[in-house]
């Protein structure tokens, strides 16, 4: 019994001694390691980014200018056509008959004019001999004038019927790419009105328009910069990484939409190979005025503290401190910092998730900030507003 008590006391004493022993080095919390680097300083240029769609510089709904039966189609669906090229032929026989009737009416009017002039000449001779009165001569002169008017009307009718005959040949009003035929031979179509049957459509080839909307803030910014001349525009399609296409801003609407607070702008874009089609979605970048020296840090180094954007910097003694910053756009994969940092601050660019509270100590390993390589085409990787927004990239500098 006594032996058991001694054994229990020994075990209890060992437990107490073990609890009082200092923790081993492996159990001691280690200072977190982070990677720091000074901000990258370089010349950058702000770009305002917009979304929009491509539009044709000219688009025509091809309609017949006279009604009739379609007798032939003279183009291949989707082909390139030139202005004046024959597209459709309507049955010309009704127009030919109407033209013949108009010419017959013209001949009748000319005969009546000849007779009226002969009667007038005879009456004027009898007036000299005082065989007729002045009133009769005046009546004959009026008959001549009436006959001349009838001839003029008949000539106009002939020209109108000639036009009707010409309009049985439906030609391309502009050069461009034609759509498919909407009417096959043998169908009767109406013509001569805006509600007539659409036979096909043509969109102009060559340059295309890129139309987009900009906020009132963008408009004010560029107006205050008093930009002169046509501004260059860079564009990309939805499946392209870089802004490799170029255009020129050539039109700004004359009023801001009071409902949405935006204004419509348009750029002209070359389309030599015809790759760009009206209705395509795209993004455009409009260069801001001039370049400036900016500090850049990785976008991942920026954290959010309630309504503020912050980055963590490490002092010489390893102490971490947050710095509120004002941000700009992303250029070459790096975020522009407009204010809040100095060129000598050591910014945490990796391991920031290990920061539990300001003022803690860290082990700082020196790293380097490098920009993302520009895509093929030489245009920098610049991110601005989201694709669904018409605002510009500099709106990110608000700091919210």
Image: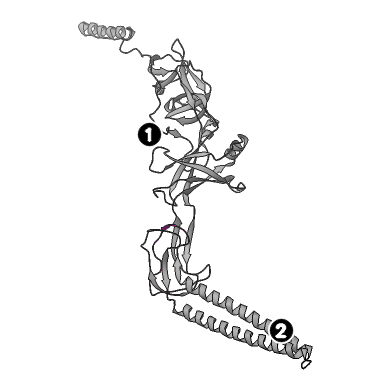
Give x and y (percent) for residue 95.
48, 78
How far is disc 2 from disc 1 in space, using C-alphas? Answer: 85 Å
Q: Residue furthest front?
A: 129
Figure quadrant of residue 33? top left
At a point 38% along the width and 34% down the height, the residue shown is: 375
- Name the residue that disc number 1 marks: 375
Quadrant (top left/top right/bottom left/bottom right) for the N terminus: top left
Q: Is residue 208 visible?
A: yes
Q: Can residue 355 be seen in this view?
A: no
Q: In this view, does 228 lie to the left or right of 30?
A: right
At a point 48% along the width and 60% down the height, the residue shown is: 60
Give x and y (percent) for residue 242.
40, 37
Q: What stretch is highlighted in magenta?
A: 172-190
At a point 61% along the width and 36% down the height, the residue shown is: 226
Does the CB distance between marks 2 and 1 fall below 8 Å? Answer: no
Packing grade of label 1 (10 A; few <14, some 14-19, many >=20) is some
Give x and y (percent) for residue 313.
46, 18
- Name the residue that disc number 2 marks: 142
Q: Is residue 393 magenta?
A: no
Packing grade of label 2 (10 A; few <14, some 14-19, many >=20) is some
Look at the numbered disc 1 and give the secondary structure of its residue: loop
Look at the numbered disc 2 and give the secondary structure of its residue: helix
Q: Is residue 227 left or right of residue 237?
A: right
Camera-side residue of 335 and 294: 294
Sequence-earlier tag: 2 or 1: 2
Camera-side residue of 305 and 138: 138
């Amino acid at each position: 019994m006594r032996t058991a008590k001694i054994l229990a006391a020994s075990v209890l004493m060992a437990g107490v001694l073990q609890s009082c022993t200092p923790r081993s080095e492996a159990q001691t919390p280690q200072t977190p390691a982070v990677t720091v680097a000074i901000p990258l300083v370089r010349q950058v240029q702000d770009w305002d980014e917009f979304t929009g769609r491509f539009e044709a510089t000219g688009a025509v709904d091809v309609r017949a200018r006279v009604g009739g039966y379609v007798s032939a189609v003279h183009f291949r669906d989707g082909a390139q056509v030139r202005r004046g090229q024959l597209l459709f032929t309507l049955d010309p026989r009704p127009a030919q008959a109407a033209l013949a009737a108009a010419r017959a009416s013209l001949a009748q009017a000319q005969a009546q004019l000849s007779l009226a002039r002969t009667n007038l000449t005879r009456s004027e001779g009898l007036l000299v001999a005082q065989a007729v009165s002045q009133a009769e001569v005046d009546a004959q002169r009026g008959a001549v004038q009436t006959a001349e008017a009838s001839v003029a009307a008949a000539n106009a009718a002939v020209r109108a019927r000639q036009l009707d005959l010409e309009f049985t040949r439906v030609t391309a009003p502009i050069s461009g790419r034609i759509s498919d035929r909407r009417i096959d031979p043998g169908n009767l179509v109406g013509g001569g009105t805006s509600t007539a049957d659409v036979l096909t459509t043509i969109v102009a080839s060559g340059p295309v328009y890129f139309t987009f909307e900009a906020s009132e803030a963008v408009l004010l910014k560029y107006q205050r910069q008093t930009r002169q001349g046509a501004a260059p525009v860079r564009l990309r399609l939805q499946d392209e990484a870089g802004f490799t296409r170029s255009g020129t801003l050539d039109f700004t609407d004359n009023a801001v939409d009071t409902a949405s607070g935006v204004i419509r702008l348009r750029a002209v874009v070359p389309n030599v190979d015809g790759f760009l089609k009206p209705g395509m979605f795209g993004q455009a970048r409009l260069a801001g005025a001039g370049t400036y020296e900016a500090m850049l840090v990785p976008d991942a180094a920026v954290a959010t503290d309630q309504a503020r954007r912050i980055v963590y910097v490490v002092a010489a003694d390893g102490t971490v401190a947050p710095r509120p910053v004002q941000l700009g756009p992303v250029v070459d994969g790096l975020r522009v910092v407009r204010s809040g940092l100095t060129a000598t601050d050591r910014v945490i660019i990796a391991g920031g998730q290990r920061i539990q509270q300001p003022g803690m100590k860290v082990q700082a390993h020196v790293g380097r900030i490098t920009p993302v390589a520009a895509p093929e085409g030489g245009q920098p990787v610049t991110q601005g507003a989201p694709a669904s927004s018409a605002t510009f990239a500099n709106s990110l500098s608000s700091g919210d």
